[in-house]
Amino acid sequence: MTTTYDAIIIGTGQAGPFLAERLAGAGMKVAIIERKLFGGTCINTGCTPTKTMIASAEAAHVARRAADFGVVETGPVGVDMKRVKARKDAVAGASRSGVENWLRGMANCTVYQGHARFESPTEVSVGAERLTAERIFINVGGRAVVPQMPGVDEVPYLNNSSIMDIDFLPRHLVIVGGGYIGLEFAQMYRRFGSEVTIIEMGPHLAGHEDEDVSTAIRGILENEGIHVRTSATCIGFSKRGDDVLARVDCVEGDPEVSGSHVLLAVGRRPNTDDLGLEKAGVAIDKRGYIVVDDQLRSSVPGIWALGDCNGKGAFTHTAFNDSEIAAANLLDNDPRKVSDRITTYALFIDPPLGRAGMTEAEVRKSGRRALIGRRPMTKVGRAVEKGETQGFMKILVDAESHEILGAAILGTGGDEAIHSILDVMYAKAPYTVIQRAVHIHPTVSELIPTMLGELQPLEK
């Protein structure tokens, strides 16, 4: 027996539930399918649990620095990893239950649990059930990549999901990958008390960032005792007793690193390989991402792809925006597009990096005339008062239109302060709008107008 719906949504990550509410609220009969944990990566193994653990690690770090602020020390600071994990599980569990209860209580929406597979362009099976609809939305997310490195199958390793399940402190955590996931876990576990080594194949950490940003990030981590090995061109693994031996083969330093545990953080891949997309005729690219147009429509009419599986963004905020774009086009006669959004994200180390728009390297490559402003956090009063003066901020402006091209704020509050810049970029307003604004003192944001008043030509 086949059950007919107006719309089928596969996956309950950040795009799925909001879209279900919009479609159901418009009177459509909606089916939403989840094969495992409600809420997707963000709630279960991504943003929510990791930021909860980062908060615990920051508390330990601040406690160890108490004397710097004139607070009398009461003894060495210890971390109970079982309690850290329990707190993380409680926060993530509440969010997961909230999403599930929201969907199960939603009018016009039916929840199915199981693995969804396409049977045709309009049919999806979930176990013995068969569903059909003229509109199908794929929101299946992604998972960690296991790199093809020598010996990787011969040693135990963790990824961003499995490391969420441990309730003990690794003696020496070796992290392969100097991207955002690796860096956040590196600082977190160092603050919990582990020895930490980061191994990165490229010449810089956070390789998508400008070199000055990457260098500053490395300095922040090394200041906390994290070992960093870059240009690791020949990574491999083997066992040595109870330890894992990682071959590095870098230009400088020991050719091997011995650790108690290994975390692989070298990228992610979309969960599109077991959906039966070939039966629906949905095109994917060479990396497995579903090919979509500017309104997130796949190669097959009536099928859309949202979130991490479409390759248009790897963040919770881009996935949620995907659902807004789909809903606006279907229900509101509002032709919103993926290309309308500005690249923005944060790296949640401490201090954090907030990013918006183009990097300095991208501006230089574009060949346009530009202006640049910089300010070290040592000249930001709020940072000095908090004793958090690592990092800097910089902004790039088109010399002719005066529109803001991009910005980076690496410093305390940078993940929040970046939004005042981002909003003006969306308004396509000149930088003078911020420069002439009166910001609150003492804040990090108040120095953005000051920085804009000190713009200099970007040298070629």
Image (tube, rainbow, N blue to C red):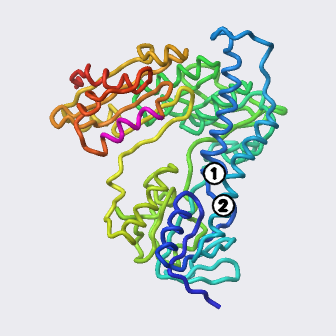
What secondary structure is the stretch in magenta mostly built from? Answer: helix
Q: Is residue 161 left or right of residue 22?
A: right
| Residue of label 2 | 38
* Left/right of residue 444 with respect to residue 106 in the rendered view: left
Residue 381 in the image: above or below residue 395: above
- The foreground one among 51 and 27 is 27
Residue 50 vertical position relative to residue 395 in the rendered view, above or below: below
- 394 to 175, vertically: above or below: above
Residues in magenta?
416-424
Q: Residue at x 41, y 17 (%)?
A: 376
Q: CA distance from mark 1 to mark 2?
A: 8 Å
Residue positioned most to the left:
400
The x, y position of residue 297, in whole percent, is 40, 69
Which sits earlier in the primary sequence, circle 1 or circle 2?
2
Which quadrant: the N terminus?
Answer: bottom right
Amino acid type of the residue tagged 1 in the rendering: Ile
Count of marks overlaid on the render: 2
Give the quadrant of residue 109: bottom right
Sort mark 1 into few (<14), some (14-19) or many (20+) by Cα contacts within 10 Å.
many
Number of the label disc, if any, that sits on residue 43: 1
The residue under the point 46% across, 62% down is 323
Choose top left, top right, bottom left or bottom right for residue 169.
top right
Image position, residue 259 (x, y; %): 74, 29
- What secondary structure is found at the residue carrying circle 2? loop
Q: Quarter-wise, where is residue 105 in the image?
A: bottom right
Q: Residues within 10 Å of mark 2 (few under 14, many from 20)?
A: many
1 and 2 marks in contact (CB < 8 Å): yes
> Residue 19: image x %, image y %?
50, 66
Secondary structure of residue under mark 1: helix
- Give the residue at x 63% y 43%: 149
The kind of residue on which mark 2 rests is Phe
Asked whether 284 falls inside the magenta stretch, the response is no
